[in-house]
Amino acid sequence: MALVPSGSGGAPVIAEVEMNGGADQSSATVRATVVQASTVFYDTPATLDKAERLIAEAAGYGSQLVVFPEAFVGGYPRGSTFGFGISISITNPKDKGKGEFQKYYAAAIDVPGPEVTRLAAMAGKYKVFLVMGVIEREGYTLYCSVLFFDPLGRYLGKHRKLMPTALERIIWGFGDGSTIPVYDTPLGKIGALICWENKMPLLRTALYGKGKAFHVC
């Protein structure tokens, strides 16, 4: 595997990866892009616009697989407790936290839903396999999830983070064993885990047992 410098100038927001760099060049090469960029917090339409610009840039480099960070759509609540536990406001922490959580909840997306349809259309437009970190909303519960899309513009499915880490547990619900997919694609079998899940040996073993070739995390 070899990193390929981005040609966009300045601080790169994407890292391109040739998956067989340094290996037998007679074997198939898969070109992947790992996006390193931030959410437009509390503004999901703007975040999706940003995602499309980055996908278009990656596709311009010939990428076949484009991977976004954890919680890119919806945002990672770093430093936020939304009024639980340690106060985030000296004056009226719970009221302030309640308002902040309402905005965070509103920025999450339904799966399936219009934002998923738009992401699928992006994957189809730019002919890439797309792996996107999102905050998923189901009823009154939020989940940290990964969504998978193919170059035909189809939503393939999702993985929900099984066990949120530390204070994440006061914000996100728990996933379960029903969303540990591995997708068989022309590039190879693609699966994903999120952050600290990579420290869970049995969860990794479940993916290995399904023949996963690309481990996206």
Image (tube, rainbow, N blue to C red):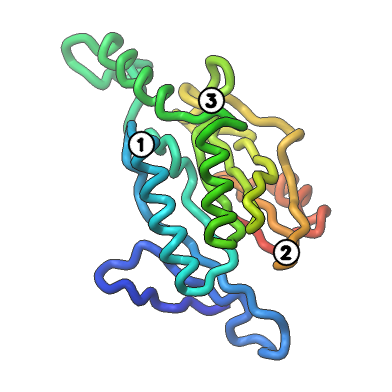
- Left or right for 17, reference 20: left
Q: Amino acid at mark 2?
A: Ala
Helix, strand or loop at mark 3: strand
- Left or right for 87, reference 133: left
Q: Which residue is mark 1?
A: 78
First reached walking from the N terminus: tag 2 or tag 1: 1
In the image, is residue 142 above or below residue 148? above
Query: Depth check: 186 or 193 in front?
Result: 186
**Image-quadrant location for residue 84:** top left
Q: Which residue is mark 3?
A: 137
Helix, strand or loop at mark 2: loop
Residue neighbourhood size for the residue with mark 2, other residues' Cα within 10 Å, grouped as few (<14), some (14–19), many (≥20): some
Q: Residue furthest left?
A: 91
Distance of mark 2 from mark 1, alpha carbons? 31 Å
First reached walking from the N terminus: tag 1 or tag 3: 1
Residue neighbourhood size for the residue with mark 3, other residues' Cα within 10 Å, grouped as few (<14), some (14–19), many (≥20): many
Q: Which residue is mark 2?
A: 213
Helix, strand or loop at mark 1: loop
Image point (53%, 61%), residue name: 126
Q: Are marks 2 and 3 in contact (CB under 8 Å)?
A: no
Can you give x and y, in whole percent of width and height, for residue 72 in the image?
44, 44
Q: Amino acid at mark 3?
A: Arg
Image point (42%, 51%), residue name: 51
- Left or right for 193, reference 85: right
Q: Is residue 195 visible?
A: no
Can you give x and y, in whole percent of width and height, for residue 6 in the image?
38, 74
Q: Nearer the viewer, mark 2 or mark 3?
A: 3
